[in-house]
Amino acid sequence: MNQDIAQILVSEEEINEIVTRMAKEISRDYEGKNLLLLGILKGSVVFMGELMKRVTIPVQIDFMKVSSYGSGTKSTGNIDIILDIRRKDIDKCDILIVEDIIDSGKTLSYLAKYLQRKGAKSVKTCTMLDKPSRREVDFKSDYVGREIPDLFVVGYGLDYDENYRALPYVGVLKEEIYNK
Ligand code: IMP
Ligand code: MG
């Protein structure tokens, strides 16, 4: 285990079960639709890669990049679109936003409304992790991998100051790392 990790919260085996289950649900629900998995960079990349492999219906992918966090463990709450989606056929797309984790809920509630306004045929959301106790806006994701307590976690795409994204599990970062 990485020396900066206090505890593994979601193991590789559990992640594998979660992603397999979610891909099955999505494949069933989007049968006959125009599924576009829209990953939010950079945190969703690992989840996105594993999810799309397991989806058994035709699927397209795209990415957007937003920033709400400066550096560190606290959200600033302001959402900036750094990389937008550019498709002429957005009115034909059933968009499923793919996110690593929901905290305050501000990023996903903003993006879902934004894509609806842009004219998407439908917009739903899918997140690997959810911290419901941290919610600041009324928001519920359509697909949730697993709920977790209010802990700052890294790995499986999630970072602290751009580090730890490549860890194959989700771990709790030692407090001494971000209180340095
Ligand atoms: P929200 O807009 O507050 O829901 O923020 C969601 C974003 O915050 C996620 O896409 C992550 O980038 C980041 N985030 C929230 N909690 C954590 C965490 O525990 N570790 C790493 N990033 C986090
Ligand atoms: Mg993120």
Image (tube, rainbow, N blue to C red):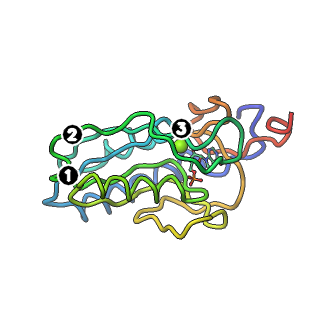
The residue lying toward the viewer, choosing from 16 and 30, is 30
Q: What amino acid does circle 2 point to?
A: Arg
Identify residue for label 3: 157
Kind of residue at badge 3: Gly
The residue pinned by badge 2 equals 87
Q: Which residue is mark 1?
A: 93
Asked whether the residues under the numbered discs 2 and 3 touch, taking CB atoms below 8 Å apart as contact, a structural biologist would say no
| Quadrant the N terminus occupies | top right
Percent across and percent down for residue 66 are 48, 40
Mark 2 and mark 1 in contact (Cβ < 8 Å)?
A: yes
Rendered image: mark on residue 27: none
Q: Secondary structure at mark 3?
A: loop
Element under label 2?
loop
Q: Residues within 10 Å of mark 1 (few under 14, many from 20)?
A: some
Q: Quadrant of residue 25?
A: bottom left
Q: Nearer the viewer, residue 60 or 115?
A: 115
**Element type at mark 1:** loop
